[in-house]
Amino acid sequence: MVHREGAGAAGVDPQQLWLGAARTGRGRKPAFSREAITAAAVALADAEGLDAVTMRRVAAEVGAGVMSLYSYAPDKETLLELMVDHVSGELPTDGPLTGDWRADLKAIGHLQRALMLRHPWLPTALTARRTLGPHALAFLERALAALRPTRLDGAAKLEVFSQLTGFVAGHVGYEIAQSAAAEAPGRAAAEARYLAAVAADGHHPELAAALAAPGRPLTPEATFTRFLDRLIDGLDTG
């Protein structure tokens, strides 16, 4: 078998990955596990980003030879699948739902945002088509249960969950990028001066009116909540 750092997602067999044995190798009991390898990869991505996650780096983190890791994850794409499901285990899946599907769906969106902020690499990892591991499936089950009071059919419920997850991932990715850009000295003040100048040039009346409107809380949490409310309150379940 040829092992590659960047093998495509099409090569990941979800049935083999999630329903097969956790380790394909045989012989004496290993000194580490798939769980330990995945946890090490997650810690590396949290600290240094996805680009830092290579089979060689992860092997070094767990004190293993690179070739031995291939018994657990044949390529980086499989490792990413394991990482996504590993952190998905942080999402709560128990506790009663309110019965108000919009409120429950908004709560799910906030949980997803919190998870992605804890693991800033996750929005990027989710841009590729991912399989649903046991933790992700458990959270999906909860989201579908939250949508039970609607008149949506099964396919539409899955689409709503996908739409919600895509929105959260996109927003958090933008939020992280904006936070990094804002750290540049004088960046926010320069942008404000620029927009004020444009609004005053007489060629952008709609922008001028928008900027003159009463301000709203601009904290990341408040901004996300407004956007999430608009998304979910506007969903058509007829």
Image: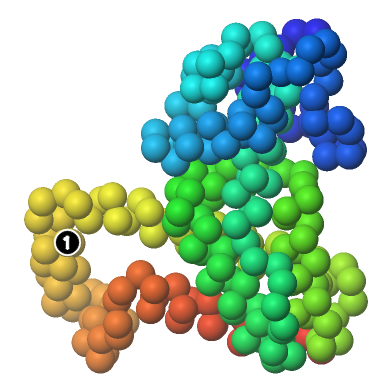
Residue 143: where, in percent of width, then height? 74, 71
* Foreground of the two, 223 or 13: 13
Can you say which quadrant of the picture contains the N terminus? top right
Residue 55: where, in percent of width, then height? 58, 19
| Side (left or right) of 148 relative to 167 | right
Q: In the displayed structure, would residue 75 be above or below residue 187?
A: above
* Foreground of the two, 94 or 231: 94
Residue at figure coordinates x 89%, y 71% from the top left: 154
Q: Which residue is mark 1?
A: 188
Q: Classify 10 Å Cα crowding around label 1: few (below 14), some (14-19), many (20 and above).
A: few
- Look at the numbered disc 1 and give the secondary structure of its residue: helix
Residue 176: where, in percent of width, then height? 38, 54
Amino acid type at circle 1 is Ala
Could you say which quadrant of the image residue 107 lies in? bottom right
Residue at figure coordinates x 68%, y 28% from the top left: 33
Whether residue 86 is visible here, answered yes or no, is yes
Could you say which quadrant of the image residue 175 lies in? bottom left
| Side (left or right) of 36 relative to 173 | right
Q: In the displayed structure, would residue 113 be above or below residue 211?
A: above
Q: In the displayed structure, would residue 168 be above or below residue 221?
A: above
Could you say which quadrant of the image residue 77 lies in? top right
Residue 79: where, in percent of width, then height? 66, 30
Picture mark count? 1
| Side (left or right) of 7 relative to 225 | right
Residue at figure coordinates x 61%, y 28% from the top left: 37
| Side (left or right) of 39 relative to 187 | right
* Foreground of the two, 33 or 68: 33
Can you say which quadrant of the picture contains the C terminus? bottom right
